[in-house]
Amino acid sequence: MFRKFLNRNGLTSEMSDFIKSSFGNIIEWYDFTIYGLFALQIAKSFFPNDNRLISLMLIFATFAIGFLARPLGSLIFGILGDNYGKSYAVNLSIWLMAIPTMLIGILPSYQQIGILAPILLIILRICQGISAGGQFSGLITIAFEKYRSNSSLLVSLVYSISVMGCFAASLIGYLSITIISLFTPESLFIKSLIWRIPFILSIVLFYFYHKMVPHIEKESVVKKISFKFTDILKEQPSTFFCMLALSLSTGMIYYTLFTYLVTYMQLHAGLSKQMAFFVMNGILALSVILYPTFGYLANNSVNRVRVARIYSLCLLVMAALFNLHLLNQFYGLLSIILMVVFFCAVTSYTTSYFAEVFAKKYRMTACSLSFNGGMSIAGCAPLLAELFSSKSSLGLSFFIMIITCLMLVSLSILSKIIKPKVVLVPHHAK
């Protein structure tokens, strides 16, 4: 069935191999998602404090630290990709993601080894951040360079596959909470299993990826290209900072909707852990379908940026209407679903530009640095979202609106940088 879908859309078997290799992103997005989804539970294990807000702020700060390491990873893997092949860099980063994730799952708590526990957690989060810097941006570059006419569709498929990692994290989290809740009374050890099991199970995902793509170390070496990082800033400064702002805004909204929202529903909307994870499962399952759908539409769009700006305006309206959840939970849930729909549309229409707008000689490095540079700051989204939410019942709505305005500004600048896409008529249609 998958091959038939590819053939109908003019995608070759070589492209299907590219999509298969993108399954490594499931590991990255799974690993980062479980940390955010289980923030409340992890906070109790590593940052015990009588003040729940302080404990939660510390765990979200640790979440952000992992993202701050991403630019270093993007620089390392960007240079590796430009000199030794994009696939080599992507696959190496996946290998380096699996180990720290599993170690977090078996890391002793603060009650067991004291201050050493949060220190080790921070070190492992930094390792995760470095390895995450070379994956998604590398796949964006490969999609554009090798399959330019289908780049939007392929990148959206990669997004869809990546979100499967988030969905897997949320689903396993829901199952863990449901199963562990059967044990009464709950001991401290049993409670810790709620978040530890999903971390340990990440090694299973890595095993299946390794079996699916056994040729990780067999990437051929390409001709080395010599350039300096300053060349990017000298030759394309406005483009670089525009894409940095776009990555920052989309990343912040992503980690607010797909990570922080579980915590928000438990602390501020009065939902139980099980119900919060159940709602998140539905949102993530919907996004898995939305990404390839909008990617297909973007692939045939003449002016993707203009369409993305329209969807961004719709997202801004929905963020304002999210305040209705104070009156009725149904309207609040509906506004969340629509925000997810419009956000998936924006990212499907714009993500391939991260590779498209940069010169070939430093494309992966520029793509990695702009994408991961924005994401490094976007990792603060759960922390900032909780600060806004704790100050006002309207806080989360205003936070999303502010970030969406930044997205609109960056899209307006991007529209002046790029040219409208020329849609090529397939040979068989002539």
Image (tube, helix red, strand yellow):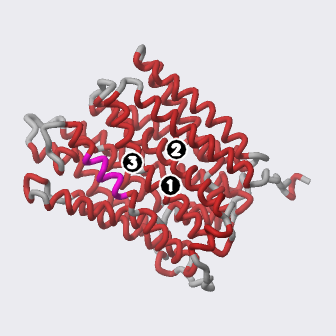
Instruction: Tell which circle, 2 or 1, labels the residue nearer the N-terminal end.
Output: 2
Occupied quadrant, residue 113: bottom left
Along the viewing direction, whichever of 141 and 59 lies nearer the viewer? 59
Task: Estimate the x, y position of residue 417 in percent, counting from the top left.
Answer: 73, 54
Q: In the rendering, at what x and y percent does residue 373 appear? A: 49, 59
Which residue in the protein does label 1 denote?
Answer: 374
The residue singled out by tag 2 in the image is 288
Quarter placement of the C terminus: bottom right
- Give the Cα separation between the discs numbered 1 and 3: 11 Å
Which comes sooner in the sequence, label 3 or label 2? Answer: 2
Q: Which mark is residue 41?
A: none
Please report whichever mark, 1 or 3, sits nearer to the chain's N-terminal start.
1
Task: Please identify the residue farthest to the front as the structure is shown.
Answer: 234
Seen at 36% across and 31% down, the residue is 389
Give the amino acid type for the residue marked by disc 2 in the picture. Val
State the separation of the CA atoms marked 3 and 2: 24 Å
Which residues make up the magenta segment?
A: 58-66
Judged by depth in the image, the label closer to the viewer, 2 or 1, is 1
Circle 3 is placed at which residue position?
380
For residue 293, which quarter of the picture?
Answer: top right
Q: Residue 170, image x and y in percent?
A: 36, 43
Would residue 351 be counted in the magenta stretch? no
Task: Tell me the distance, in whole angstroms, between the alpha carbons under discs 2 and 1.
Answer: 23 Å
Disc 2 element: helix
Q: Amino acid at mark 3?
A: Cys
In this rendering, position of residue 65 left or right of residue 219: left
